[in-house]
Image: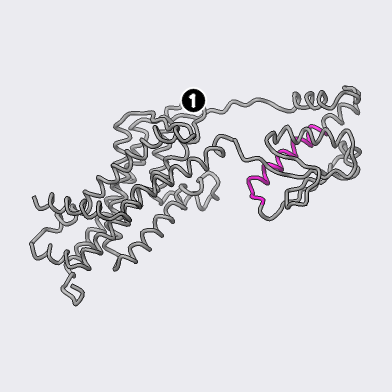
Amino acid sequence: MRLRALVRKELILLLRDPHALAVLFLMPTLFLILMAFAMSSYLQNRLPPLHIVLEVSQESAASQLFHDALQAQLPDSEIATRSDESLARVKLAPNFADTLLDVPHQGPDLVFPAQFDNISRERLRSAVRIALAQSRLLAYLEDSDVIDAQMPTAERLELAQARTQSDMKEQDQLASGNLSGRANATQMSVPAWLIFGMFFVMLPMAGSFQREQQSGALLRFRCLGLSLGTLTLSKLLPYLAINLLQFGLLLALGVYGLPLLGPPALELPGGLAAYLLLAISVSMATCSLGLLLAALARSSEQALLLGGGLNIILAAIGGIMVPKSVMPDAMRQLAEVSPMSWALDAFLTLLVGHGSLADIVPYCARLLLFAALLGSIGLLLFHKRVQQTQWTTHY
């Protein structure tokens, strides 16, 4: 009866706190929507167009063919011949046509402005390499009298493309070992930001404990003879339920909400039991971390600083903000200590790998072990804080 009253009290206080509700529901929703939009083009290989300048010192049939080949590699991009803006530039040497068959060959010069990001730089490098390879191939075929040098540029380029390009089929390997079509962008982006949002539950959880201690409510609970277990459960159960609600709502947003805004719908392969186990495992991990934070922090401001900083650090090293595939080896090994990494791997096993309950059990076991370890430490510190709570001049 007392536990029910304390849980009800915790929920009422939470519903009256608009800031906590924004942290728990509004912010994860915005993160999910914004990142799904931001990553949708990248994950579906529809990268934004480039604006570049191709500087040609001496016009020739070879330079024109190079221009057309480069445009074919960057079909949505704009290739200008001159511009006063700070744009990436590809500079062809005056003797470009005469040196195509040189070995070793000196290719065009690339000049990048400072704000040109690394992904765009690599895109341009790859496009220039392919266009240059096609230009050199045609120069070799013409020099060998295999093709007529008087052929129209479009036909020559088509011939080079036919000899240098291949269609490749991309598939994802499922947890079962079978292959399927490539997963859509939503399958790849939604899990990361759903997990990131769920871990923010530790902020209001720690803040609630600090408010009760500062207001004297915690001391009054002690005077009523409430057990440590009752006080602890009164903190864990409401936020555990909120985490499960977050999980369900954010998945529903991915399935039904995102398609209305443009990105593809989130598909949920696998059984309900797998998602339920994952939801409980992640919720237990976040709430145990919140309990430990509540016991460690000495003020609401300290809880906010520690909780926010810890959440960002776990996300940064856990593959939430930066994919683990692009991390150096040392960072990939460090990522294995982040509970967000385990949760993300389990989610991707379900959504992308079409895994089953058995496939995610190892990840969920890590999360539950993490929850048990941090929960035990948090419980000991929580008990110590409760025992040390005394009347002060602030009450």
- Where residue 312 appears, x then y in whole percent? 43, 55
- Where residue 103 appears, x then y in whole percent? 86, 40
Say if the magenta span includes residue 128: yes
Is residue 350 something one can see in this rendering? no
Most common SS among magenta residues: helix
Residue 67 placement, left or right of 258: right
Task: State the residue at coordinates (90%, 22%).
Answer: 148
The kind of residue on which mark 1 rests is Ser
Quadrant (top left/top right/bottom left/bottom right) for the C terminus: bottom left
Say if the magenta span includes residue 339: no
Task: State the residue at coordinates (89%, 27%).
Answer: 142
| Residue 216 image-quadrant placement | bottom left
Which class describes the residues within 10 Å of circle 1: few (<14), some (14-19), or many (20+)? some
Residue position marked by numbered label 1 in the rendering: 180
Task: State the residue at coordinates (39%, 28%).
Answer: 269
- Where residue 308 appears, x then y in whole percent? 39, 58
| Residue 46 image-quadrant placement | top right
Is residue 296 something one can see in this rendering? yes
- Where residue 289 appears, x then y in whole percent? 31, 55
Furthest-bottom residue in view? 393
Residue 113 placement, left or right of 9: right
The image's colouring method is one colour
The magenta segment: 116-136
